[in-house]
Amino acid sequence: DRARLSGGSSDEAVRRMVVRALGSRSGEVLLDVGCGGGRLWTVMKGRFRTYRGADAVRYEGFPADGEFHRADLDGRLSLPDACAELVTAVETVEHLENPRAFVRELVRLAKPGGWVLVTTPNQLSLLSLLTLLLKQRFSAFQDVHYPAHRTALLEIDLRRIASECGLVDAEIHYSLEGRMVGTPWHVPGILSRCFPRAFSDNVLMIGRKA
């Protein structure tokens, strides 16, 4: 039920952030954990030969050329060790109970030298910090978002989790798109590029499995 509340999709800005963070990285298998409707594959075709998606629910629109694996993302996935060059969790970790156990599972699934990529709402944006000050809740973790959104992580949490789970060369990236406080509009792109942490709605961590 919590999985269905998410709708199985993420913003186009998040997928653009993933593409920027990956740079020229490519490989044989992309494993998308918390894949939703599989829209990440639309921007990853050509970089990887095989797309595998794992989620609690198979959403409508999952790619016909993808492999779907039903999974409880709060537990161990029924997939073999070291099965993908890139393991992604796009806007997924905030829905789960134990982010450290989840990232350890992502690292298990990555091949040695492969990459693990995680995105989540950016709690350090100006919008989120002001919401915390005024409402005592982060912007993406208000009552309307619960119980779909359960775990709020900061940039420092992502860095610490990466290190604790055996990832090296960890990088942080931002979506460079964010809503203006008190409006439905987005801040001008020049502001988000100059102050990415303050004016990005989403943050990304990518690290390599040693």
Image (cartoon, rainbow, N blue to C red):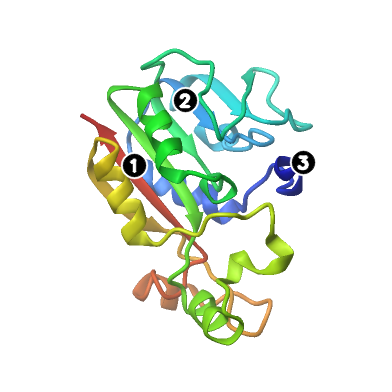
What residue appears at the point 68 percent right and 52 percent down from the top-left corner? Answer: 148
| Residue 168, placed above or below residue 193 | above
Tell which tag, 2 or 1, sits nearer the viewer. Answer: 2
Give the Cα separation between the discs numbered 2 and 3: 26 Å
Dot 3: within a 10 Å radius of its alpha carbon, few (fewer than 14), some, or many (20 or more) residues? few
**Is 54 located above or below residue 147 in the figure?**
above
Marks 3 and 1: CB-CB under 8 Å? no
Q: Secondary structure at mark 1?
A: loop
Kindly identify which residue carries mark 1: 23
- Which sits earlier in the primary sequence, circle 2 or circle 3? 3
- The front one of 73 and 155 is 73
Q: Could you say whether the residue bearing mark 3 is in a helix, strand or loop?
A: loop
Provide residue 144's location: percent of width, then percent of height.
74, 65
Mark 3 or mark 1, earlier in chain: 3
Q: Image quadrant for the C terminus?
A: top left
Residue 109 position, x and y percent, is 40, 22
Residue located beneath label 2 in the image:
30
Label 1: few (<14), some (14–19) or many (≥20) C-alpha neighbours in 10 Å: few
For disc 3, the marked residue is: 1
Q: Looking at the image, is mark 3 or mark 1 nearer the viewer?
A: 3
Whether residue 49 can be seen here: yes
Callout 1 amino acid:
Gly
For marks 2 and 1 on the same chain, the one whose residue lies earlier in the sequence: 1
Q: What residue lies at 62% left-to-right and 53% top-to-bottom?
A: 11
The picture places residue 22, in percent across and down from the top left corner, at: 37, 41
Disc 2 element: strand
**For residue 166, what is the image quadrant?**
top left
